[in-house]
Image (cartoon, coloured by chain):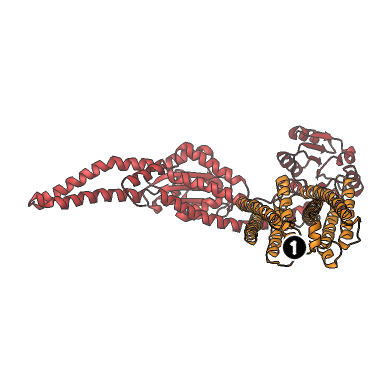
Amino acid sequence: MRSLLLAVLAAYVVASIHAVLAFINKRRALQRVSEWAMVTGFVLHTAALIADWALYGHYPLFYLRETLSFLAWTLVASYALVLYRYRARPLGSFTLPLVSVLIFIAIINRSGPGGSAEAISMSTTWLFPVHTTLVFFAYAAFFVVFVASIMYLLQERQLKLKKFSAIFHRLPSLTTVNEIATSAAAIGLTLLTVGIATGMLWSSSRDGRLWHNDPKEIFAALTWLLYLTLILYRSTSSWRGRMAAWMGVAGFALVLVTFFGARLMGGYHVFG
Amino acid sequence: MSIVLVGINHKSAPIEVRERLAFTDDACAVGLRSLVDGQVVREGLIVSTCNRVEVLTETANGKLSDTTERVIQFLSREDFLPRSFYETHLYTHTDDQAVRHLFRVTSSLDSMVVGEPQVLGQVRRAYSIALEAGTTGRILNRLVHHAFRVAKRVRTETGIGANAVSISYMAVELGKKIFKSLEGQTALLIGAGEMAELSARHLVDAGVTRVLLANRTEEPAARLATELGGEAVSFDELSSYLAEADIVICSTAADHYVITEQMAREALNKRRNRPSFFIDISVPRNIDPAVGDIPNVFVFDIDDLESVILSNIREREREAERAELIVESEIMQFQQTLRMLDIGPTIGALRQKLQDIAKTEMTNQRNRLGSLTPQQERAVEALLMATVNKISHPLLSHMRRSYDASDSETIQAWRDIFGLEE
């Protein structure tokens, strides 16, 4: 499995390097190489995840390496969707290097399973894969919101100051990044809502409790509230700009706390 | 390669000299036919624009100095111009340097405004004139096509033409940066200044579908409206039209703020916060600077535009450095293309091969001929060589024809038949 993941890493590294070079040089050929390398990487990656699942008999989200690899997979899928829908290539220069780093850590990490054998046995129900997959895709969508928001803030600031850096000319237009942030936030919130709901169902089927006051649950709830506010705020007008973009940034900070921070604080959500 | 380029441009000569040397399209065609005589100059092309006259030639006899001399003489227009009037302003480039110069000119690296897109069209036009006059051949055809390719590469791979360097084009560029595309956007022109008019034209070319014109006096607005396909609107109802406009260009002679913060805020509310973009090219300013502090409203006054243009020019210069690298690598590629095409070695090798066969047969059969006088021996050799040459002549001229037609496949076929190495 490691060798397959190494091939995945190689493809993503090639994709990242070419995406960054294409961003700097504006060369179509580089962009094409980047996209093909990404597609190749994604196909291999999907195969690796399925193989993992088949080999170990559990959904690949128990070891830290599995979690990171899965997160990287959702990020690539989200980027591919944004690329397909908005042709927003510069996003790749941010997403693909991050994906490569995640895969790299996944390869070198050898830590044991986060959950107990009991937890693994409990996870055989269909709710576990659905819950985790939805939440991971929600996080990936929020990452897209985050990057688009940064792009928005950067450009808005430069437009107001009337001083443009080289990067300004390479980013998608203000309208494009605004649209990306809006729709990615809506998709992310929907996924998170269903994800949390299935999580509650799963938990109640295990011990009859919907809520455990576990740090991950609390932060996830806060994240959900923040993005709900963001969506409501955006929907009251046809355009919200700076403020909404800042919320997109803050929301992602909260996502990071939920994802990594809660892990450190322990609690009911032992894995991932 | 024996390419000679003699030229004059905005850096080497003042307008007084350039205008006297410039060619009209007709003069170009006539001039080319007289310049390209097949004796000294085999191929020729003239690029003549307001900033430059470039005469690009391929020598027929391999003597670059002859060709240079002939082109300089040619520029005097049958001695109407004394040579001393223009000769000191000319530059002469040969071979690689000439190729480099043409590539740089076509890619707009040698232009007054680096990266301006017109020069490519001008070279294209010059080429089609030369093509019609029949004065380009295998070398210049390839060279000019290669130059077009270089220009395209430079344009797509560097940001040399990316950032606007004129005020009138700034509206289009910033508009695209804010609104993704100008398709379906509405522009409002307040005042009918020349600059505003030019900006509006660029906007319409870029896809703006609706142009509103407001002017104190109705008549210029009405005239512009018909020209641009826009609607003239009343100056007094400005505030109600402001909400409909995505892009506002203001250039009136008013000495007060035509658009106040209050008006802009109301417009933004009616627009449900959708961003709007104001350009103020009037002095004194017509748009209250406080409008620029409103979120989602972007205001550029004349100083802002000038400073952005300045930084864009610097950005273009940085990009031009990268373009120069592309040009250098393309020069090498072009040399390779020419080498591939060069028929000389092939013809030489073929002739050598046939003569070698004759000579070998001669030595093999020499003994059978018995003793010969030196005259007889020379006669036999001459006979053999003459036979070889007579037989190979149609072959070689056929090869030359394939070469002139740039038919590299046929040339390769000949090479294969006779087992000639590259």
Q: Nearer the viewer, residue A185 or B398?
A: A185
Which colour is chain A painted?
Answer: orange
Among all residues in the image, which is located at the extreme left?
Answer: B371
**Splitting the image into 4 quarters, where does residue B188 fall?**
top right
Mark 1 residue type: Tyr
Which colour is chain B painted?
Answer: red
Q: Nearer the viewer, residue A58 or B317?
A: A58
**Residue A11 place in picture, x, y as percent:** 63, 57
Crowdedness of circle 1 by 10 Å Cα count: few (<14), some, many (20+)? some
Q: Is residue A79 visible?
A: yes
B45 horizontally vs B255: left or right = left
B260 horizontally vs A134: left or right = right
Residue of label 1: A63
Secondary structure at numbered mark 1: loop
Q: Give the answer, above or below, for where A262 lies relative to A156.
A: below
B170 horizontally vs A246: left or right = left
Which residue appears at 80% of the width and 45% of the height? B251
Which residue appears at 57% of the width and 43% of the height? B122
Q: Nearer the viewer, residue B397 or B282?
A: B397
Q: Give the answer, above or below, for where B217 lies relative to A260.
A: above
